[in-house]
Amino acid sequence: DSGVTQTPKHLITATGQRVTLRCSPRSGDLSVYWYQQSLDQGLQFLIQYYNGEERAKGNILERFSAQQFPDLHSELNLSSLELGDSALYFCASSVGPLISYEQYFGPGTRLTVT
Amino acid sequence: AQKITQTQPGMFVQEKEAVTLDCTYDTSDPSYGLFWYKQPSSGEMIFLIYQGSYDQQNATEGRYSLNFQKARKSANLVISASQLGDSAMYFCAMRDDKIIFGKGTRLHILP
């Protein structure tokens, strides 16, 4: 158990809908990262937040947005969902502001868009 | 542009043998880090090992070592004395101002 929690574990929704994925980092970690893992794209870095501020941005679509709250939990919002957004979404956390090589990953949220 | 390439989509190895998983990279940044993660069938991502671009010695962590050849831009993972529990997907990744992952190599350890 990495100490990172993600909810929900599974999510099934229809195209055009909007969903919110939630992540609680490991105790003491201030950075939260979001990743998308799909069969065709592999594992892609989406975005990093550190202590409430956006820190680094990867291949995050404009339809996606994230935020980190004062209690350090983070949410990833996915809107106008398309079939291609079906993927496993990971949250990870680490202590400091720089992108860490040693990140602690949550179990992921499996999103299925039908 | 940053790029990570893992050319072996799948490998089968006999238990107790050593395994080398290939990884090549490309970056124009002189300061970067390379690392490996393991993803078992259960799905979680587990950090294995890290190598900084300025590190003089190859990184080692227990049965894992990273064969870093800077001139060749390669960062191969070596697993010594493989075990059945090593069967998993292995990802090579690179960090500079962001982080990118390779497509992964699926390793099967045969009893």
Image (cartoon, helix red, strand yellow):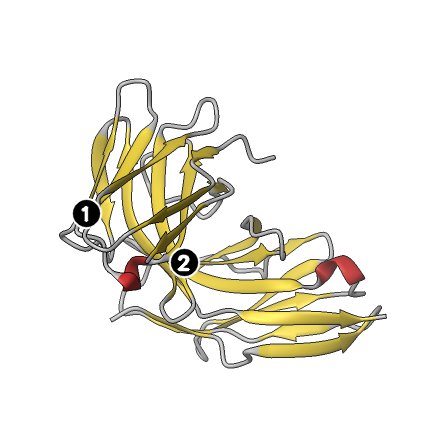
Specify the quadrant of the image occupied by residue B89.
bottom right
Foreground label between 2 and 1 = 1
Q: Give me the residue at 47% from left, 28% from top.
A: A26
Label tally: 2
Callout 1: residue from which chain? A
Q: Amino acid at mark 1?
A: Ser
Q: Secondary structure at mark 1?
A: loop
How packed is label 1: few (under 14 Cα within 10 Å), some, or many (20 or more)? some
**Disc 2 to disc 1, C-alpha distance:** 18 Å
Q: Which mark is residue A37?
A: 2
Q: Is residue B32 visible?
A: no
- Does mark 1 fall on the same chain as mark 2? yes
Which mark sits nearer the N-terminus, 2 or 1? 2
Q: Which part of the image, by quadrant, shows the N terminus of chain B?
A: bottom left
Specify the quadrant of the image occupied by residue B93.
bottom left
Q: Give me the residue at 45% from left, 48% from top.
A: A101
* Percent position of residue A11, x then y: 39, 44
Callout 2: residue from which chain? A
Looking at the image, the residue that sits furthest to the left is: A62
* Percent position of residue A74, x then y: 31, 31
Q: Which part of the image, by quadrant, shows the C terminus of chain B?
A: bottom right
Please indicate whether residue A99 sits to the left or right of residue B50 in the image: left
| Residue highlighted by disc 1 | A79
In this view, A90 is above or below B91: above
- B24 vs B9, nearest the viewer: B9
Q: Secondary structure at mark 2?
A: strand
Please indicate whether residue B1 sits to the left or right of residue A73 in the image: left
Q: Give me the residue at 65% from left, 56% from top.
A: B60
In this view, A24 is above or below B93: above
In this view, B98 is above or below B72: above
Q: Amino acid at mark 2?
A: Gln
* Percent position of residue B75, x then y: 51, 69
